[in-house]
């Protein structure tokens, strides 16, 4: 990994601290300045608008009512019956696991964990 020399880091640190102090001074200057007072202008008065006559709309024309269409009766679909299952199902048999004789010893490992 490359080493960072103090000749590079120190000037960068000094420059950053000076610029940070400069920003604080400018911000304080902005807070302390006062804005000039603006004279209050009189509110303008709007002229009275003339009253408009109420608009009357003609009545809507009457539309003839349409007869309700008659649909033919559709036959109900018939579903096939469910297949019949017996009341008692056969239980599956599991194979038996042979027992090891007691004379056989498990192998011993020679290396320690």
Image: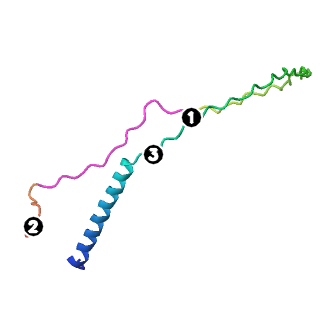
65 in relation to 23, above or below: above
Q: Is residue 72 visible?
A: yes
Q: Which residue is mark 1?
A: 83
Judging from the image, the colouring scheme is rainbow
Horizontal side of residue 70 vs 99, given as left or right = right
Alpha carbon separation for disc pair 2 and 1? 59 Å
Q: Earlier in the sequence, mark 3 or mark 2?
A: 3
Residue depicted at x 22% and y 78%: 7
Q: Residue 72: where, in percent of width, then height?
A: 83, 26
Q: Earlier in the sequence, mark 2 or mark 1?
A: 1
Q: Nearer the viewer, residue 97 or 71?
A: 71
Q: Which residues are magenta?
A: 83-101
- Residue 61 picture quarter: top right
Residue depicted at x 29% and y 69%: 15
Q: Which residue is mark 3?
A: 35
Q: Nearer the viewer, residue 103 or 33?
A: 33
Whether residues under marks 3 and 2 lie with C-beta atoms below 8 angstroms apart, the answer is no
Horizontal side of residue 47 vs 104, given as left or right = right
Q: Which residue is mark 2?
A: 109
Residue depicted at x 81% and y 22%: 51
- Which quarter shows the C terminus? bottom left
Whether residues under marks 1 and 3 lie with C-beta atoms below 8 angstroms apart, the answer is no
Eye-nearest disc, 3 or 2: 3
């Amino acid at each position: 990994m490359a080493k960072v020399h103090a000749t590079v880091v120190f000037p960068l640190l000094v420059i950053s601290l000076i610029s940070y102090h400069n920003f604080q001074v400018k911000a304080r200057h902005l807070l302390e300045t006062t804005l000039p007072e603006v004279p209050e202008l009189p509110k303008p008065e709007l002229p009275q608008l003339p009253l408009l006559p109420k608009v009357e709309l003609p009545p809507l024309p009457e539309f003839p009512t349409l007869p309700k269409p008659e649909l033919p009766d559709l036959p109900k679909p018939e579903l096939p019956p469910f297949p019949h299952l017996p009341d008692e199902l056969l239980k599956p048999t599991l194979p038996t696991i042979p027992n090891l004789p007691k004379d056989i010893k498990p192998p011993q490992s020679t290396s320690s964990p």
